[in-house]
Image (tube, rainbow, N blue to C red):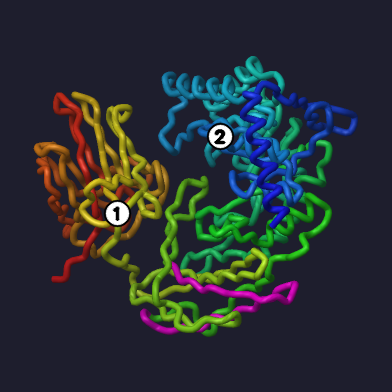
Amino acid sequence: MFNRVHRTVLLLLGLMLSHSSAWAVAIPVELNKTDDGWQLLRDGKPYFIRGAGGKTALQELAAAGGNSIRTWGSDDIDTLLDEAHALGLSVTVGIWLGHERHGFDYSDEAQVKAQFEKARQAVLRYKDHPALLLWGVGNEMEGFASGDNPAIWKAVNDIASMIKDLDPAHPTMTITAEIGGGRISSIAKYGTAIDIHGINSYGGSPSIPERYRAKGGTKPYMLTEFGPPGTWEIGKNDWGAVTELTSTQKALQYKKSYQQGVLSAPDLALGSYVFIWGYKMEATATWFGMFLPDGSSLAAVDAMTELWSGKPPENLAPVVKPLIVKGDPQVEPGSELRVMSDINDPEKGEIKVRWVLRRETKDEQTGGDYRAMIPDIEGAIIESSSEHALVRMPEYPGSYRLFLYVYDDAGKAATANVPILVKGKARTPMPFLVYEDGFEDMPWAPSGWMGSYEELTLDGDHADNPHSGDACIKMRYQGKFGWVGVAWQHPANNWGDSDGGFDLTGATALEFWARGEWGDERISTGVGLIGKNKPYPDSGLATLGDIVLEKAWKKYVIPLDDIDLSSIKTGFSISLKGQQRSVTVYLDSIWFIREKK
């Protein structure tokens, strides 16, 4: 207890000192080339990056031997920088740049100019903070194709050049998705102000040094994301599901990537940032996170601790082998299935287990966009122990995944999972929510803002007079004229350039409740929005327009009987016009239903 309190007092003292200094003294960082290769110097001393991507568990990172963190953007990072500095950690501050797949147009001069100015303001704000190590200009902004669009690289280099003018004390880096296509040649040709090539690589990270040299890479590099192989790098089973490594197997992958992708190239590699020092829902609930949501650390943390500090932690995470399905993993609806496990705690301590069945996510694309957590299926686990689980599968056909969570008594954990198929034509369970009590953990994100959205505010946690539950949506448009709209998209910011969406076949209607601030507000709503001119359109479109709201809550219904609902990327949309004054409307309980006939 004394050590924990003592550490907290020191941290708070450090934060106070950092704030009181008003960030007046930057720590200079140099990129130096010697006869042995490239190296970073921080405050005149060699600095090899032992870093992690993320904003949480910073005390654990410092205790593990890490010395740096990386952010992907620069919004609201003041407290993070202060905390990192108090713990002796440096920060590579990301400058987020727009992605074309999210609708950013690098041929649009106004968009590029606004992005440049936002980057300039971030540099002016944080350039003197003593925690600052590097500037990370963009993250995979080149996309996932050839990555050689000159307009993108000109915008990247313009920002990097501006940074050098404003802050010559900190080097610049840009981060790409792997090194294929024209990435290396584009940085060499257009990136004259880029000092370091950051590389996000997963299954291919051990071979980065060899491949980087073969493609003509000469700038120093670092692995800016690495971890287990991504879903795009793993073969699929008979029904298209991917096999996820156990947390024990992933730890070995982290170790191999670091040793072969970083340490084997001391002349070029400046260090790395492991992905992700925290928890993230992407592909599955456990694919990339090095921690669980409750803060329990997995074997990947143990592996990096040993690599960074030279010795393993005193207490190691439990060891888990791949789960084994007894019998055929393709089963009939409502059938029971037994799954076997093999668990070992290195310290022979007490362990606890939790088995969870979840529906499989349809979204396994690259890019790291926000994904909503898939809820647990209640009542699915009939029996459970550290050795097996007996599972009753749902009546709804489709792909599912059974998860095993293992916990020891020292805050360490292990995970494993196995995909299971319920045979038959998949049908999404109804009702299927679009919104209920907040935007978190909902299948679609309200990311598609349209029209004069600069005058729009959208509050998904408005607690005053909801129709049901604890909250509703408050949508306020302050423009007197013009129009504004919001589309609920999957994945977020999907205007038809990415796969995604949900199969809602069998739904007969979308229901929602709405009211106006005063009554007489006019809205138009719909299901589906993306036309056939896009690579991934909504399979069907339905609208309900010219709705005149009342001051009291009222239910509205969009009929869907004759609509193809096999792939709905836009679950709901709403638009409204200015009425010579600001317009405020409220929405609640938005869901798809299947009425019995």
Residue 334 falls inside the magenta stretch: yes
The image quadrant that residue 212 belongs to is: top right
Name the secondary structure under disc 1.
loop
- Which residue reaches farthest right? 35
Query: Which amino acid is tagged 1?
Result: Asp
Query: Residue, x 66% and y 76% (percent of image)?
Result: 350
Query: Which amino acid is tagged 2?
Result: Ile
- Which residue reaches farthest top? 165
Mark seen at residue 355: none
Mark seen at residue 77: 2
Q: Which residues are magenta?
A: 333-358
Earlier along the polypeptide chain: callout 1 or callout 2?
2
- Relative depth, front residue between 120 and 354: 354
Name the secondary structure under disc 2.
loop
The image quadrant that residue 535 belongs to is: top left
Residue denoted by label 1: 470
Residue 201 visible in the displayed image: no
Image coordinates of residue 423 in percent, x first then y, are: 39, 76
The local crowd at label 1, few if under 14, some if 14 to 19, many if 20 or more residues have their Cα within 10 Å, is: some
Query: Residue, x 73% and y 76% (percent of image)?
Result: 348
Which label lies toward us, 1 or 2?
Answer: 1
Query: Residue, x 57% and y 23% (percent of image)?
Result: 125
The C terminus, quarter of image: bottom left
Left/right placement of residue 433 relative to residue 158 reads left
